[in-house]
Image (cartoon, coloured by chain):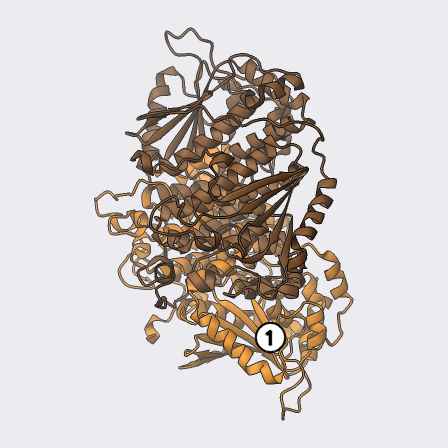
Chain colours: A brown, B orange
Amino acid sequence: MADQDVINFQTHPDQYKHWKLEIDDDVATLAMDVTEDATLKPGYELKLNSYDLGVDIELYDAIQRLRLEHPEVRAVILTSAKEKVFCAGANIRMLGSSTHAHKVNFCKFTNETRNGIEDASAQSGQTYICLINGTAAGGGYELALAADHIMLVDDGASAVSLPEVPLLAVLPGTGGLTRVVDKRHVRRDHADYFCTLTEGIKGKRAVDWNLVDEIVPSSKLAEIGKERAKEFAAKSDRPAGSSGVELKPLNREFSENGIDYDHVKITLDRKVRVARITVSAPDQAPPQAIEDIHAQGSDFWPLALARELDDAILHLRTNEPDLGTWVFATAGDAAHVLAADAALAANAQDWLVRETTLYLKRSLKRIDVTSRSLVTIIEPGSCFAGTLLELVFAADRSFMLLGTFEGDNRPAATLRLSEANFGPYPMGNDLTRLETRFLGNPERIVGLRSKIGEDLDAEAADRLGLVTFIPDDIDWEDEVRITLEARASLSPDSLTGMEASLRFAGPETLETKIFGRLSAWQNWIFQRPNAVGKEGALSQFGTGHKAEFDMNRV
Amino acid sequence: MADQDVINFQTHPDQYKHWKLEIDDDVATLAMDVTEDATLKPGYELKLNSYDLGVDIELYDAIQRLRLEHPEVRAVILTSAKEKVFCAGANIRMLGSSTHAHKVNFCKFTNETRNGIEDASAQSGQTYICLINGTAAGGGYELALAADHIMLVDDGASAVSLPEVPLLAVLPGTGGLTRVVDKRHVRRDHADYFCTLTEGIKGKRAVDWNLVDEIVPSSKLAEIGKERAKEFAAKSDRPAGSSGVELKPLNREFSENGIDYDHVKITLDRKVRVARITVSAPDQAPPQAIEDIHAQGSDFWPLALARELDDAILHLRTNEPDLGTWVFATAGDAAHVLAADAALAANAQDWLVRETTLYLKRSLKRIDVTSRSLVTIIEPGSCFAGTLLELVFAADRSFMLLGTFEGDNRPAATLRLSEANFGPYPMGNDLTRLETRFLGNPERIVGLRSKIGEDLDAEAADRLGLVTFIPDDIDWEDEVRITLEARASLSPDSLTGMEASLRFAGPETLETKIFGRLSAWQNWIFQRPNAVGKEGALSQFGTGHKAEFDMNRV
């Protein structure tokens, strides 16, 4: 892949082209102001605050910085800096000219970003309020739907809409359908009507149907918006007078066959289409005292790890689509990993520690919804303990060496459970990975909890159901190799569908519905001629020609 | 559509070509014995107990008759009459040569049939036990997964497998992935491994991983199987000494533009691609005394209605794919409908009444998962009360005339709630349609319950949130017409995805996961070149050529 085609997920407010971030005391205002020609790829213009992945990468960056760099911010106003337009959603020409894979990846990232907004409102005492100061169409309204409180200007023109079905023959791709009925409890017949209207719904009906929370005269929008923000801010538990942590640029180095971060090293094995991701324990035990943690800032190992994993996942997903299997490994001293877990647990009440834990949760969740086969390898020298042990439970399969390698004098690998495996990192289904693994057997979880702190060798790990296979050194190389080769020979599409179906046993949530149900339908529709064929709606949009549809129902 | 292409869902044990049904006291044995050349369409042979839709139609018929014609049957043994082969799953050549729409419809029906098996085990005191007397591959194992208890012969060869991913680059299409992790709680890493194995898993490991419940020596399979059946039968609450109800052939008459059943009349309006389905109340109040209900047998209106709706839905889904909207109406005396509801409620403890209510539940569920837009029309002369009112709540939109038509001296339409709207007909998400409609507002349900028995005119129905729109006679015709025309102009694919996403707010169950998540992924994969392209796995299967895959992950 040529360098200029690599999509970079790192940015900084100084470089924003599409968003204006202002902070006034405890309220931040994040205003969308998309620069039409500052597109990620050529061939389209970002008119009317429509967006492409580049716009959303900036939004994601802003949200993350608000959480970590601005503990003083307790409410965020999401609005537009353009007159009469809030946001026109994902750019249609961009969608029309994108590959299937790009569309799907784009939707996944935008979904994760909106889930992050909801996570900030629900978990971080940083409530998002959306001021819709004009039309909010499609992805524009879906962005609003991520906020806790939606205000719509009542000017006789401004409306919210999900016009994807009537206009483009696709679905609202960023959780809109699910959030309308499952989050906002819009009645299904109202939702049905709403989602077939090109022009959307405005004014009182938008409130009556619960599409928005309140309507406000144009002249009062800013004032009442600020008032609401202050009301939400007053309920926040974020600390007064604490200073944030600068998210320093990541150290990362790309080479032909890999990427090196401080604690995450990736080797790209293109022959077997595998990315090997090795996470290192900190060189020394992270600080335990909260002042020292704050002093380390973004160098605090758990936070650095969350950021590096995050970036690595996004990079590999987007830029290395043919590396179909990710192999996780770890290296270093498990005691240091457990010390990091202990530091997080002991200081859980601190805002920065809370944010760090939530960030780790989100990075681990990204792994769960990644359409790659996940294999974890546990060898001597590894440090699968506590937080890092989640990489074993997130895997589709894991291999743990029974005993040692001949000629290797390192001790046999062990696993170590910590409290981190029993709560702070739920999956999208709101269960821990262990609860999902042992669905219907809560007594297994109780039993595992009693093993916290024990060194679990391969036989113990196998007996407890923590790993899939425990070959000895004679079989090890062949077993792992055959697994990776076999995986590389299978159809990537069927693996994606299979993994998405097997990973999330148990209850479903807004999140799993979005990634499992809505995304699957959207992916299907993104393949259908009615949407993407030559005569399909996405191709014909804006040409003056009407799309031609196959009218058979499937 | 030429008559010979119409797929007929009505059959009778006398006509079975693929199943042997034997009843011995309280245990029935349903043995699969597929006739290779008795295929529904030309071009393939049903070797090794593989099946097509025709085989599954017989299975469905047998299951229904066991429930209604055989109250004495308390356990059902599902097995194969062939040596060393239980069932090879859906016929691959049939799949390879089928249209996308046929594959999807086929999977939906087979899923519903397996859900019906689970419903019989859970609700009817008729437990299914599966005796796997040979290989059970793909759909063969998925059929077993629908049973409450799975026994696998331990002969060193017989195995259970889901080889779709490695063999065909598609998913197990009949709930296998979901049932493995969500019903049987197979660990996700075990499931992942299992679902990539062509040869499957046999013997002790199949039990250890909970893929089956027990393994049994070949020589003892029949004996121990019978023993287990007797154990389950002993726990059943089905009545001793009661005689069943003969399911008489349906009266139905097909014409160019419609189908007439006794209580369901269908008009096909091909110009606007609409099927109008009018359900009639019984001519007189159905009997209230249990002896009289039994005496009516399959003529008892609620049972007749369940059967006619069932057949009508299956017929329209399969044979009229371009009629994208179904419009429900009713005609007759609401008092008679409520009398039927009263008869069901008063005799709920009777086995036949229970079966009738469960049948109505299943027919209504079929509507929910039908990929057609559902509109209900409420006019003077209609009888939307109790059970029939569910047709309003199942609709994507409903229209109720405010007042009367000029020159029509019938009184304005009213709705009437009964207890039938508050429990006996849950949707796949295990909530009633009203609970789903008012998700998150349980107080609304309490309020509605207090209205049972009241005549609710259009304004009251609107106020209570029971209907979508209440145009008066001046606007009525235009509003309804415009809605139907607009619906007919939209892409059927995007409507399918939208409706599937909006209809099932709230919790998810095995059933909604299968229809919403698994089916959507399968539909996507059924469109992808890796499966269905010229070089794809379904096309290349059995040719000796290897499929060629695009190795990029999406």
Quadrant where the C terminus of chain A sits is: bottom left
Percent x, y for residue A445? 62, 29
Give neighbour class at mark 1: few <14, some 14-19, many 20+ (Cα, 10 Å): many
Left or right of A515? Residue B43 is left
Q: Is residue A463 above or below residue A541?
A: above
Q: Is residue A531 above or below residue A388?
A: below
Quadrant where the N terminus of chain A sits is: top left
Q: Residue furthest left?
A: B544
Q: Residue furthest right?
A: B450
To which residue does mark 1 refer? B399
Foreground: B339 or A140?
Answer: A140
Asked if residue B213 shows in the view, the reply is: no
Left or right of B342? Residue B267 is left
Amino acid at pointer 1: Phe
Percent x, y for residue B292? 67, 75
Left or right of A213? Residue A376 is left
Percent x, y for residue B223? 50, 43
Foreground: B447 or B223?
Answer: B447
Foreground: B545 or A28?
Answer: A28
Please report, as a chain letter, where disc 1 is located: B
Within the image, what quadrant is residue B433 found in? bottom right
Q: Is residue B112 above or below residue A105?
A: below
Local secondary structure at mark 1: strand
